[in-house]
Image (spheres, rainbow, N blue to C red):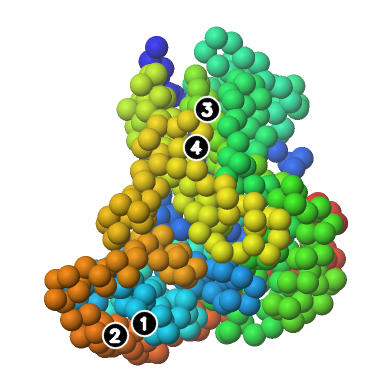
Amino acid sequence: MSTKIKKIVVVGGGSAGWMSAATFATQLDKVEIVVIESPDFPVLGVGESTLGGIRHWASLIGLKDEEFLPKVDGSYKLSIKFTDFEGTGTGGFHYPFGASIPPIEQVTQNDWWFLKGNRPKFFDKSAYARCHYPIASVAEQNRISTDSTGKTLGFNFSYDSAYHFDAVAFGQYLKEAICLPRGVKLIPSTVDGVVTNENGIDYLKLKDGSTVTADLFVDCTGFKSMLLGDALGVKFNSTEDIIPNNNAWATQIPYKDKDKQLEPFTNCTALKNGWAWNIPLWSRIGAGYAYSDDYITSEEALAEFKKHIKKTYKINPENLEYRPIKMKNGIHDKLWHKNVVAIGLSSGFIEPLESTGLLTTYEWLLSLVFVLRKGFVNQWDREAFTFSLTQTYYQLAQFVGLHYAISPRNDSEYWRSITERVRINSHDQDLVTSSELFQIANALHKHHEWQGGYNGFQCIAAGMNYPPIDYSVHNALGRLRDFDVEQHLDRLEGLYSETQSRYKEYADTCPTLYWYLKNHIHNDSFEVKMVGTLDELDPSDPVLANMPVK
C-alpha cells in the first residue's frame, strides 16, 4: 500500500540524526520534520574520518567549507595510510583519493607490476600510489593541493577530498545552522516506549508522557536500533565472521608539533591484536585502537594501546582519558521495513578501517531522499532501497576484509585467524555482492593480469607486496614473442622515475596543511578545549558534568 509522507520523525540526535534532518529540511517541500534528541545520553566525540563522497552530500545540502569546518574542529583528508600491515616495523603505504592515472596512455597498471616483479628494489611501499595518483606525493609531505585544473590529474579537490572533524560537533552544527532555521522541530526528550501495529510503528511514548506519530520514522538510535531492530524485530546479520573487530578504545592526543602532526590523511597502524587509528583534527588528534575481544581482553587492549601511544606520540599515556566503544559489525535483513527506515549505525556497520561509518549514512540518505521526493512510498521503494544498499554494504565489507586476507602477518593468534576469514560467497548473498572479489580472483588465477575492480586493491596489494599478476608468466610470454624484456623494463623504469619526480616537484610547491587551514579556514580564531585530559577543561565547562569517560 502506498503511503503519503507528510511527517517524518527522526529518533536520535547524533551525527546520523542531524544529517538525516538536514537532508530532509533542504530537499523536501511541505514535509514536517521532527527530531527527538535525548538529553539523557550525552556523548563525547572521538573524531571522525570521512571519504570523498561526503562532498556530494555536503554540496546537496549547501555546506561551505569555510563556514562549517571552523565550527567542527575540521581538517582535510587526501588519503588513507596503512602502517605495519605487512609486519611490525615494515612501514606504511598510501591509498589516495581520486582516480588512478597511468603515466602515459599506452602504459597500464600491469606494466607497473611487471616492472616491480622484475626489479623489486626500484620501489618502496607507496610507489604504486605515487606513480598513479599525483595527490599521493602531496599527502605524503603533509601538504595540500586545491588544484583541480590538471596538475593533480585524476584528483578534483572540490569532489575527491574528504574531511576529518568532530562528529558530535558536526551534528550540532547541522542542528543549529541548517535544521532549526529551516523549521525542523526539536523534541528534547527520551523515547520511553514504542507501540506497533500492522503498518509498523503506531506511535512513540516519550519520557514526559506525551506521544509522537509520523508517516515515516527514521531510526538513528545507533547500535541499539530501537525502532527497526528492537520494535519491529528485523533480523541483524553479523559480519564478524569476516571482520571480528568489535571493540575499541578511543582518546584525544594534544599536538606537540602541529605543522608536522597535522597530516592530510588517516593513519591506520596494525598492532598485535588489531589496529590503531590517527585522525588529525584542527585542535587535537583523535586516536583509537580497534580490536576483537575474542583474542584480547579490554584491559590487555588498553595496555597495548598505551604502549603504542607512548611510542608514537612520545607522551605519557597515563595523562590521557580513555573511552571504551562497543562495535557491532553487520547489517539488518531489511533497511526499510513498513514505516521505519534505518540510517547510520542502526542500519549496519563496518569497522572503521576504511572510514565507511559516515559513508553509509550519507549514501543511504541520497537514496532515501530520492524516494521521498515523490511524496509517497510503496513496497517497491522499500525493497529496492534494501536490495541495492545491502549490496553496497557487503561489497564494502568484503573490501575491508581483503585488507586482512592479503596481509602476511602471523605474529599473533589474531592475525593468524583474521587473515583466513574472507569468503567469496559469504552470507548467502546474491553473486552481485562478490563481483569485485570475482574480478580480483580471476585477475590472479585466470587472466594473469589486472582487468579492473577496486582501484584501491592495487594500492593495498602493492603496499603488502601481493602482486595481482605473475611477472614470470609474462616474461615467458615475452620470450615466445621475441619481446626484448630488458629494453621494455628500462623504458618503464625511466618513465615511472620521471613520473614520481614530476609529482614530487609539484608537491614541493604546495603549502602545508597546517598553513593552509590557519590562513584559509580557521584563521587562528578557533580552538577546541578538549584535547585529551579533564585537567585541560575549564572548570566551568558543562562538559565536565556529563563526561562519559572514566
Q: Nearer the viewer, residue 445 or 493?
A: 445
- The local secondary structure at tag 1 comes to loop
Quarter of image, res 87? bottom right
In contact (CB < 8 Å): disc 1 and disc 2: yes
Quarter of image, res 391? top left
What kind of residue is marked 1? Answer: Arg
Q: Earlier in the sequence, mark 2 or mark 4?
A: 4
Which mark, by number, is residue 333?
3
Q: Nearer the viewer, mark 4 or mark 3?
A: 4
Question: Dot 4 surroundings within 10 Å: few (below 14), some, or many (20 or more)?
Answer: some
- The local secondary structure at tag 3 comes to loop
- The local secondary structure at tag 2 comes to helix
Question: Dot 1 surroundings within 10 Å: few (below 14), some, or many (20 or more)?
Answer: few
What kind of residue is marked 3? Answer: Asp
Q: Which residue is mark 2?
A: 493
Residue found at x 78% / y 65%: 304
- The local secondary structure at tag 4 comes to loop
Q: Earlier in the sequence, mark 2 or mark 3?
A: 3
Q: Which residue is mark 1?
A: 119
Q: Quadrant of the N terminus?
A: top left
Which mark, by number, is residue 426?
4
Q: Nearer the viewer, residue 457 or 502?
A: 457
Q: Please state the horizontal and vertical placement of residue 381, each as a whole percent of the image.
A: 37, 25
